[in-house]
Amino acid sequence: MPPSRQEDERTSRPPLLEIVVPAFNEEARLPGGLLQLCAKLARLPFPAAVIVVDNRSTDDTARIVREWPQEQVPVRLVECPRPGKGAAVRAGLLTTTAPLVGFCDADMATDLDAVDVAVGLLIGGERVVVGSRAHDRSDVENRHSRVRELGAVGFRALARRLVNGVSDTQCGFKFFDGSLARQVAARLRTPGFAFDVELLARCARLGFPAVEIPVQWHDMPGSRFSPARHTTGIVLELGRIWLRLRLEPRRGEQPAWDQAPDPIGYP
């Protein structure tokens, strides 16, 4: 069935909201995730679009995006040659042009009803809105091992030293004023797991602390995070962020990626 006139107008107008989805070998989870996300965005009262960032996938991730039907919600592909989730999110944010932007994980572990809350707060004047599994009104289904839960507690304790007032820096559901997100993304230098900490810390340094909102979150299979393999690298990554923010380069100096090995790209 050909698209209706209303659908044509919706896809031809510039989006008010763009959502970045980083993807590394997500051929199994991406189709279902995109179906959910596009269905949600199609119900919004304004145009929205999706940017999938293919992070050097070796499966059919890129083909899935290229062949995705462009009906009510445009979906476009961005290639990111630098490995790591932080690198992928940065690349996606820097290609946005919309007044409001955000990113979420390909598995859609966070219930997308939270999009309405995040967008409402941004329209109301907030600049940074993040989902928090630690919020007292969040509903979290967690099947992680005890070891991983203890690791998360330790990570949050370290992250709070860098991002005051944020109880959960790692929930993959964050929304921003578009101009702020692009300004901060241009200075991001953390390509791996802890990039969220640097992102939120930089927003706070500019005077825009994050507002946390409750979420419904379901633990999804397919996580690549291993406490045994990745804990040391993540602690080192947090240390580099702390040092970098203390020794901020002169204004106007172009940032460069860390040359240290990426401890983990995707949780």
Image (tube, helix red, strand yellow):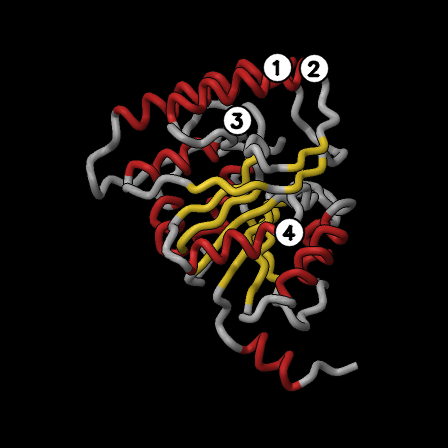
Residue drawn at point x = 72 percent, y = 18 percent: 145
> Residue 224 appears at what percent x and percent y?
68, 29
- Residue that mark 4 sits on: 112
Q: CA distance from mark 3 to mark 1?
A: 22 Å
Identify the mark at residue 150; answer none if there is no mark: 1
N-term-proximal mark, 4 vs 2 = 4
- Residue that mark 3 sits on: 262
Residue drawn at point x = 38 percent, y = 25 percent: 162
N-term-proximal mark, 3 vs 4 = 4
- Residue that mark 2 sits on: 146
Amino acid under disc 2:
Arg
Q: Quadrant of residue 185?
A: top left
Residue 88 visible from this viewpoint: no
Residue drawn at point x = 49 percent, y = 29 percent: 167
Find numbered disc 3 in the image and state the secondary structure of the residue it sits on. Answer: loop
Amino acid under disc 3:
Asp
Amino acid under disc 4:
Leu
Q: Quadrant of residue 59?
A: top right
Q: Residues within 10 Å of mark 3 (few under 14, many from 20)?
A: some
Q: CA distance from mark 2 to mark 1?
A: 6 Å
> Residue 67 appears at what percent x and percent y?
72, 63
Residue 90 vs residue 132: left or right? left
- Front one among 83 and 236: 236
Q: CA distance from mark 1 to mark 4?
A: 27 Å
Find numbered disc 2 in the image and state the secondary structure of the residue it sits on. Answer: helix
N-term-proximal mark, 3 vs 1 = 1
Residue 20 vs residue 141: left or right? left
